[in-house]
């Protein structure tokens, strides 16, 4: 075994230029793979933080009619109790029971359609972290004569208002009667989606409840779950639990976003696949050449009694060592690449146009350490697989033929 | 004297060619312990084929190769590897050595495959390199050795593991006259001193008279089998 390693190492050194070619291919392969994975992960994480976690949540529950007619009339029967039930279930990370309805927002200058969300201060900051999204103002702290409203920065622009301004919200109460009431803008929030900023305003649920005629009314339950990957299973469970309610997960609610993520995923899988295949075939070819160059040498080894299995291991070992050298070098370089990109950010070409879908135009890739090992492992594994065919060729040599080879 | 190798009705026909080539035709020979034999004949007469078949590198089409009362022609290939390693030493025409190993590592290689103790292995390898006059080249790689020196290392390797016999296929073919004589002298001496059965092939008139037995092949058949008294 020790001699096999010695022979392998010396062969690697003897063929320095070939070793360099293979190592470079591996380094580039690993860097490409890690770059792709980092971008994908950064995009996904940013996606989830901005769109899913800050706006939509993983799962939402409504009265079935509410989707088409977002009015206070379509309340979730027994909403408060259901919210408490779900909040107590294992796997629920945070939950916000809201009184939501469509209405109009008007300033002295303009008016526009908005979705009014009556929230509980604490629950909402745990669910969408609304308090952290504020760009200006305070989070339902003021004790003004008029109740507070928190609106998006874009809506403030549209309505030509600022914090401290008065706006009028108009909506229907539970019986369908029109209600108008004045609010004072306490804060402006900002998210990556301009549309959301334009359309969504937050007030306190008890204030809104009183105005629509039912203090405890709930029309929307937004849920964050602990294991974000399990959103489909959790949704299915809730559907069996509450068959009369409309229960949707984020992929149902934001199909465009879901598909853009899927497409990104697919593209990157193909990309990584092509990189790995390319590197593997390059490797296979180089190793095969090195075997053909050494037919006679290998023939002599077989003749003097070296077992085929040993010759096989020798060839595989040589590649494994080169793969390890290239793999480790690739991982170290990738690590620094990601560190640098993480500090400077990666511009996504055409990224500005993507902001309406909730994509940021600059990503800050970061990777958990396990990823380096996974990708490094896959590339090294493929390198070793690529040596199997040449090694198999080597041991199929007939010794009598091989020693005749000139 | 004990018989080391015996062939019975040995024939080899290559059929991978357009016309079948009868490379060996009914060869019946016996080699005794301690013999020093030259297989001679023009190019294409079947010398390499004969050595490959009795060395277990190739299978005969017909006939037997009996070594140690075993017909190796019927031996399974996995057993043959072991058999070759334990009983037969090989020297080929050229490029015998593993390029990345030093002379002493090359000589130790077969003993290493045999899992001999390290101490014994090193001592024997050094001793053998001394025997072939290369004690100053122990740590030299093959590329830094002349053709004659490489062949001497190959002879040292073949003998180091104390095989039952050594087969050398045209060991002098690529050597100048002086190196060729030198190599044959070394082989003749080792044959005596180590009492090792040696069979080499050659079509090189210069070195034939070093052998004590000369077998002439013509078109794959034994034409002459002569014994000479030499010392
Ligand atoms: N692998 C092979 N396939 C077909 N014919 C071969 C092969 N090896 C040798 N021969 C033929 O067998 C005959 C004997 O060859 P060989 O044993 O190499 O003779 P020598 O070593 O005396 O030159 C020649 O005619 C040669 O062309
Ligand atoms: Mg020949």
Image (cartoon, coloured by chain):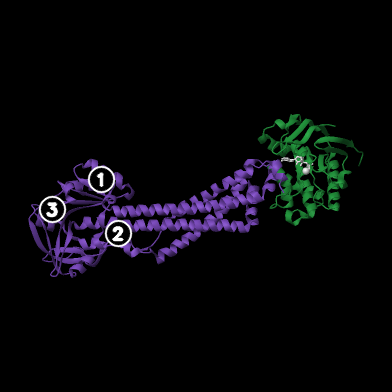
Q: Nearer the viewer, residue B15 or B202?
A: B15
Relative to B43, B58 lies left or right: left
Residue at the right extreme?
Answer: B229
Determine the chain carrying the residue at label 2: A
Residue visible at 48% across and 58% down in the picture: A31
| Mark toward the viewer: 3 or 1 | 3
Mark 1, chain letter? Answer: A
Please tell me how crowded label 3 is: few (under 14), some (14-19), or many (20+) other residues with Cα within 10 Å.
many
Q: Is residue B69 visible?
A: yes
For ligand 2, the image quadrant comes to top right
Callout 3 and callout 1 share a chain: yes
Q: Which chain is displayed in purple in the rendered image?
A: A
Residue B198: name its quadrant.
top right
Task: Work out whether mark 3 precedes mark 2 in sequence or the reverse, and give the earlier one.
Answer: 3
Q: Residue at x 67, y 33 (%)?
A: B76
Residue that extends furthest to the front in the rendered view of this protein: B18
In the rendered image, residue B59, in percent from the top left (x then y), is placed at: 71, 35
Q: Can you say whether A159 is above or below A96 in the image?
A: below
Mark seen at residue A89 = 1
Nearer the observer: mark 2 or 1; the answer is: 2
Give the answer, above or below, for where A337 lies relative to A236.
below
Q: Does A343 sit above or below residue A308?
A: below
Q: Earlier in the sequence, mark 3 or mark 1?
A: 3
User: Mark 2 vs mark 1: same chain?
Assistant: yes
The answer to whether dots 3 and 2 both sit on one chain is yes
Q: Are marks 3 and 2 in contact (CB under 8 Å)?
A: no
The secondary structure type at the circle numbered 3 is loop
B220 relative position to A237: left or right: right
Label for residue A357? 2
């Amino acid at each position: 075994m020790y001699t096999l390693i010695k022979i392998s190492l010396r062969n690697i050194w003897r063929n320095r230029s070939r070793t360099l070619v293979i190592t470079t291919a591996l380094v580039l392969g690993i860097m490409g793979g890690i770059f792709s994975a980092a971008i994908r992960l950064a995009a996904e994480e940013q996606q989830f933080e901005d769109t899913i976690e800050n706006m939509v949540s993983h799962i939402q529950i409504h009265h079935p009619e509410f989707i088409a007619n977002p009015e206070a009339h379509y309340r979730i029967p027994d909403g408060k109790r259901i919210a408490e039930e779900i909040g107590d279930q294992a796997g629920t990370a945070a939950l916000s029971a809201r009184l939501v309805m469509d209405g109009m927002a008007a300033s002295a200058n303009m008016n526009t359609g908005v979705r009014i969300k009556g929230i509980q201060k604490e629950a909402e900051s745990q669910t969408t972290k609304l308090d952290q999204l504020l760009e200006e103002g305070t989070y339902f702290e003021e004790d003004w004569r008029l109740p507070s409203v928190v609106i998006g920065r874009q809506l403030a622009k549209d309505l030509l208002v600022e914090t401290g301004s008065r706006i009028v919200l108009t909506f229907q109460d539970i019986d369908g009667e029109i209600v108008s009431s004045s609010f004072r803008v306490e804060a402006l929030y900002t998210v990556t989606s301009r549309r959301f900023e334009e359309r969504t305003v937050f007030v306190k649920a008890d204030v809104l409840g009183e105005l629509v005629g039912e203090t405890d009314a709930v029309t929307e339950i937004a849920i964050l779950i602990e294991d974000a990957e399990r959103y489909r299973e959790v949704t299915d469970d809730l559907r069996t639990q509450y068959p009369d309610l409309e229960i949707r997960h984020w992929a149902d609610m934001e199909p465009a976003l879901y598909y853009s993520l899927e497409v990104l995923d697919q593209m990157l899988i193909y990309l990584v696949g092509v990189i790995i295949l390319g590197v593997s075939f390059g490797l296979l070819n180089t190793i095969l050449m090195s075997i053909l160059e050494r037919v006679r040498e290998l023939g002599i080894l077989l003749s003097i009694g070296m077992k085929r299995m040993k010759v096989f291991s020798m060839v595989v070992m040589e590649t494994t060592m080169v793969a390890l050298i290239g793999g480790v070098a690739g991982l170290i370089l990738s690590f620094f690449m990601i560190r640098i990109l993480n500090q400077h950010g990666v511009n996504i070409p055409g990224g500005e146009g993507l902001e309406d879908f909730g994509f940021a135009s600059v990503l800050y890739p970061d990777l958990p350490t396990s990823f380096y090992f996974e990708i490094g492992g896959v590339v090294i594994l493929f390198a070793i697989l690529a040596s199997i065919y040449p090694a198999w060729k080597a041991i199929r040599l007939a010794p009598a033929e091989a020693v005749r080879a000139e | 004297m004990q018989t080391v190798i015996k062939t019975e009705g040995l024939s080899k026909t290559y059929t991978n060619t357009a016309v079948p080539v009868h490379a060996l035709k009914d060869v019946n020979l016996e080699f005794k312990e301690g013999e020093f034999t030259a297989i001679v004949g023009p190019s294409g007469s079947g010398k390499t084929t004969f050595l490959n078949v009795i060395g277990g590198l190739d299978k005969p089409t017909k006939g037997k190769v009996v070594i140690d009362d075993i017909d190796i022609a019927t031996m399974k290939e996995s057993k043959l590897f072991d058999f070759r390693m334990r009983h037969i030493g090989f020297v080929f025409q050229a490029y015998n050595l593993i390029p990345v190993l030093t002379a002493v590592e090359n000589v130790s290689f077969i003993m290493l495959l045999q899992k001999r103790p390290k101490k014994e292995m090193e001592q024997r390898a050094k001793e053998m390199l001394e025997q072939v006059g290369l004690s100053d080249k122990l740590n030299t790689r093959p590329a830094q050795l002349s053709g004659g020196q490489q062949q001497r290392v190959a002879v040292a390797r073949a003998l180091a593991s104390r095989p039952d016999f050594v087969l050398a296929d045209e060991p002098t073919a690529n050597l100048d006259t002086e190196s060729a004589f030198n190599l044959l002298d070394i082989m003749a001496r080792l044959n005596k001193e180590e009492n090792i059965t040696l069979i080499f092939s050659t079509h090189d008139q210069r070195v034939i008279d070093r052998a004590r037995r000369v077998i002439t092949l013509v078109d794959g058949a034994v034409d002459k089998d002569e014994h000479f008294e030499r010392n």
